[in-house]
């Protein structure tokens, strides 16, 4: 089986979609009899890249400023390179892991991670919404099959686009072996660099952007008793996204007081240590197609406080505390309960470990290959 996979998500620092693309490609490369070709925008390779392009954000920003209709121009150029490559590689199946599929004279599989630009367009940059509206649906209609990260997103696609259920298959994501419970001694070298103490900080992971709803976590944190804030600083891990000025103003006095620590984007090995050392993960996102950070925390035995909306209950189940992402008081009460009740926190920790074991990348890869075989047989 010859598979073409769009790997341009690997050119940027890996967040959710990048991690999905990387883990999927890594798994596919290990399958005997499957030949994988990776498209990196400017060309093709069989090599799986594990490092982003240096200064990719600055390069993209410069291109947008200098080139009118930058996205459309880049899309046109990439489509030409893609088409030449799939003809040369004689690809039998094309998998688009990042929403917007190129044209392909064969069966196409698309992974749709969420419909956030439709449900919550104000949480995305205008140019991103414009591009999604321009290119997404035509690719969706051409696709032989559609993958989603959750049952929730399958329902979203059926509701918004009227796609029949049999054309959509939820394939749940996995958790890397890198995420597992660690002792204070295990995490010490990494936590010391950030001035953190194992089990003595609250954690929020995600790009600083409106959809991740970190302002709710901050508002809740500010309502905690001063003694708890002193004992448990709030650690923010993630890249700066867009429209962050109001959030930065909110964070600034807490950073000055030492109550909030911004550590930015972390390499995976370092992130795993920081997650494993946390007291709890707070994840108040208003909309998710899956939610890798909660799963990664669960695999470390760290109880999760997460929004009880969209796909997150499918991931967290009854192993964490589900909150209203629009009500900071529910976040406050969840934190206070975990701080006050050690036995309850340990109970959640054990349940989280058990549940997280159900989510593996091997399973995700095998179910994806099953879909490739299905579309090839029906083409």
Image (spheres, helix red, strand yellow):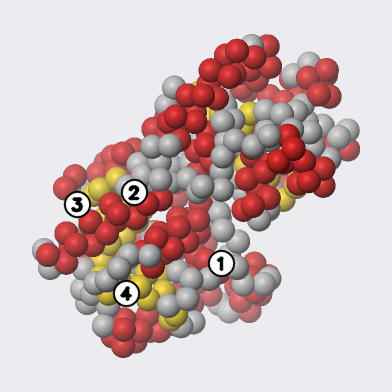
> Is the Cβ of the residue at disc 2 closer than 8 Å to that at disc 1?
no
Whether residue 53 appears in this view of the structure is: yes
Residue named by callout 3: 167
Q: Secondary structure at mark 1?
A: loop
> Is the Cβ of the residue at disc 3 closer than 8 Å to that at disc 4?
no
Q: Secondary structure at mark 4?
A: strand
State how far apart marks 1 and 4 are (Cα).
19 Å
Horizontal and vertical percent position of residue 94: 29, 70
Residue named by callout 4: 35
The residue that appears at 37% across and 76% down in the rendered structure is 37
Residue named by callout 1: 50
Q: Is residue 229 left or right of residue 165?
A: right
> Is the Cβ of the residue at disc 1 closer than 8 Å to that at disc 4?
no
Q: Is residue 190 left or right of residue 139?
A: right
Q: Please report whichever mark, 2 or 1, sits nearer to the chain's N-terminal start.
A: 1
Q: Is residue 82 left or right of residue 194?
A: left
Q: Nearer the viewer, residue 192 or 93?
A: 192
Residue named by callout 2: 363
Q: Please report whichever mark, 2 or 3, sits nearer to the chain's N-terminal start.
A: 3
State how far apart marks 2 and 4 are (Cα).
19 Å
Residue 357, by quadrant, is: top left
Q: Nearer the viewer, mark 2 or mark 3?
A: 2
Q: Please report whichever mark, 3 or 4, sits nearer to the chain's N-terminal start.
A: 4
State how far apart marks 2 and 1 are (Cα).
21 Å
Q: Please report whichever mark, 1 or 3, sits nearer to the chain's N-terminal start.
A: 1
Horizontal and vertical percent position of residue 330: 58, 18
Which quadrant is home to the C terminus? bottom left
On screen, 73 above or below 365? below
Horizontal and vertical percent position of residue 101: 34, 67
Horizontal and vertical percent position of residue 44: 43, 81
């Amino acid at each position: 089986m010859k598979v073409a996979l769009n790997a341009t998500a690997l050119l940027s620092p890996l967040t959710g979609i990048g991690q999905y693309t990387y883990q999927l490609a890594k798994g596919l490369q290990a399958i005997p009899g499957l030949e994988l070709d990776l498209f990196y925008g400017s060309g093709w390779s069989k090599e799986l890249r594990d490092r982003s392009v240096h200064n990719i954000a600055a390069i993209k920003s410069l291109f947008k400023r200098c080139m009118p209709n930058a996205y459309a121009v880049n899309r046109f150029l990439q489509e030409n390179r893609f088409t030449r490559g799939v003809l040369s590689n004689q690809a039998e199946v094309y998998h688009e892991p990042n929403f917007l599929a190129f044209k392909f004279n064969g069966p196409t599989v698309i992974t749709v991670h969420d419909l956030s630009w439709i449900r919550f367009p104000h949480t995305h940059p205008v140019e991103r919404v414009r591009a999604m509206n321009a290119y997404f649906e035509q690719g969706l209609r051409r696709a032989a099959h559609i993958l989603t990260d959750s049952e929730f997103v399958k329902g979203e696609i059926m509701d918004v686009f009227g796609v029949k259920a049999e054309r959509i298959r939820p394939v749940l994501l996995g958790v890397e072996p890198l995420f597992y419970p660690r002792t204070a001694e295990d995490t010490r070298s990494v936590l010391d660099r950030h001035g953190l103490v194992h089990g003595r900080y609250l954690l929020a992971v995600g790009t600083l952007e409106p959809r991740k709803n970190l302002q709710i976590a901050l508002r809740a944190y500010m309502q905690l008793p001063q003694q708890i804030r002193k004992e448990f600083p709030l650690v923010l891990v993630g890249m700066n996204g867009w429209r962050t000025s109001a959030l930065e103003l909110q964070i600034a006095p807490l950073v000055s007081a030492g109550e909030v620590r911004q550590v930015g984007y972390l390499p995976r090995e370092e992130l795993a240590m920081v997650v494993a050392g946390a007291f709890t993960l707070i994840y108040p996102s208003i909309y998710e197609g899956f939610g890798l950070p909660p799963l990664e925390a669960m695999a470390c035995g760290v109880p999760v406080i997460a929004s009880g909306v969209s796909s997150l209950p499918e991931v967290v189940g009854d192993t964490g505390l589900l909150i209203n992402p629009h009500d900071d008081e529910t976040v406050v009460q969840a934190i206070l309960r975990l701080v006050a009740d050690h036995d309850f926190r340990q109970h959640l920790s054990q349940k989280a470990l058990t549940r997280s074991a159900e989510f593996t990348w091997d399973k995700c890869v095998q179910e994806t290959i099953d879909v490739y075989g299905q579309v090839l047989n029906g083409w």
